[in-house]
Amino acid sequence: MRYISTRGQAPVLDFPGVLLAGLATDGGLYLPETWPVLSPSEFRALRGLPYPDLAARVILPFIGDALSYETLLGMTRASYAGFAHQAIVPLVQLDTDLWTQELFHGPTLAFKDMAMQLIGRLFDHVLTERGARVTIVAATSGDTGSAAIEAMANRACVDIAVLHPEGRTSDVQRRQMTTVHAPNVLNLAVAGTFDDCQDQVKAMFNDAPFRGDMRLSAVNSINWARILGQIPYYVAASLALGAPDREVAFAVPTGNFGNVLAAYAARRMGLPIARLVVAANRNDILARFLDANDMSARAVEPSLSPSMDIQVSSNFERLLFELLGRDAAATARTMTAFRATGRMDVPDAAWRDATALFQGHRLDDSGTLAAIRDLHATTGYLADPHSIIGIEGGRAHAIPGVPMVAMATAHPAKFPDAMEQATGSRPPLPPHLADLYERAETFSRVPNSLEAIEAEVRALVLRNAA
Ligand SMILES: *Cc1c(COP(=O)(O)O)cnc(C)c1O
């Protein structure tokens, strides 16, 4: 399997190359040169498989010869062995033709574990083969950092440094990062905002000698392997609800457009997915695009669903490339103009194509709280402030007779303040995290200075190289 950049000017790579590269050198994002397609009978043959087996079969065609099926199966089994639910990604029925798929039974209680657990093992495998070592640096406002640390802790060939804005993440989110004690993990509490942390990560990547010496790498959601690790649960849900012999639809709480892009990929593999609902909070650029072809970035506003507080959804570029008929030059032009003006000019025909499959939905904070309360009162089910936005989007855009599956992206215990505001009580942490508040924390405080941050990262790498 070969991968091409959405901007057409970067080298064509194989899967291990794409895994380690993350972003393409031309600023574009990698996509498979052709989408692997399964026939209806091949899909039917996956019905009833344990999730790790199904995941390995769905992922294998995207990897080509880089890994054998047995090696990949070993990785998917190990990735999901620690999940707190036997089904890994259980479906829960909420209403006639409305389901939710719980993606939060992993170690950090958010769906990012689904891909990140696999990526940690893929990195180790590819790097061991090459006799190489990398340093992952990441900025986080919450879920990404903890999922990356859980996935990379104690891996043989990886060091990881995560920058979080001191005092500006939730207690649960910070403790999930700082209570992991491993020699290859460095938590940096930066005196600054999330944007400062992100700028410092960019500055480290732009410091060419440092980037080379430390062999910096990234696992943010522009990495194709993140999308790849999210395709199998769409396949699992579709098969359970009757596909490929029946249409299905999904509603996805969206930030960087990575999760919903995985659903799009499942459709390109041949599943009869009739609709994809792109559900947003008040930061609704994608909903405005789908409603009225208005893709204009506004200032990010904080909400009760912080992992969706995003205005420029980086993975949208992958869909844009497809909507423009895979015209890399046109994609590059459109993205460059968007960076410069904050407005994306999508041709009307391409926008119409998008709306044939995607529908936008928007729910503000008061709607979020009311919907959590209502769902709890009518069904007893607790949905977190991200997942409820998908559930409401799924209700609003249901197609009669077609099962709608809303993706549940976080465990309600991860957002106890919002849950208490909505329902009057704080959901308990699951058993494996019940003592989170008693665990010791390890992190280094650093000023918002590139020099100080690079010194910490260099010390981590030197310590582990010895
Ligand atoms: C990251 C995240 C999202 C957004 O997912 P994208 O792939 O960025 O669209 C939604 N909900 C939760 C809980 C998340 O952690």
Image (cartoon, grey):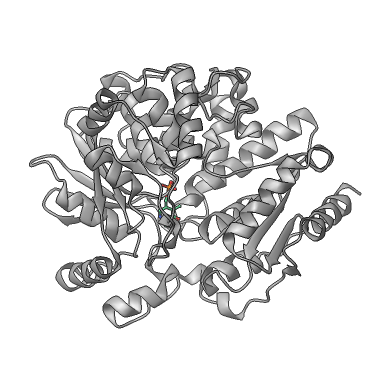
Foreground residue, 303 or 95? 303
Residue 296 location in percent, x, y? 37, 44
Q: Give the farthest residue toward the left.
A: 400
The quarter of the picture where residue 197 lies is bottom right
Location of residue 73 with respect to 464 vertically, above or below:
above
Residue 56 appears in view: no
Residue 126 location in percent, x, y? 69, 31
Residue at 63% of width from left, 59% of height from top? 196
Foreground residue, 358 or 102? 358
Location of residue 414 with respect to 230 vertically, above or below:
below
Residue 216 location in percent, x, y? 73, 41
Q: Give the farthest residue toward the front.
A: 341
Report how many numbered discs are placed on residues in the image.
0
Foreground residue, 140 or 460? 140
Foreground residue, 162 or 151? 162
Residue at 35% of width from left, 47% of height from top? 285
Residue at 22% of width from left, 42% of height from top? 291
Q: Is residue 456 left or right of residue 171?
A: right
Residue 409 location in percent, x, y? 38, 55
Residue 283 appears in view: yes
Q: Give the farthest residue toward the right.
A: 466
Q: Is residue 90 left or right of residue 202?
A: left
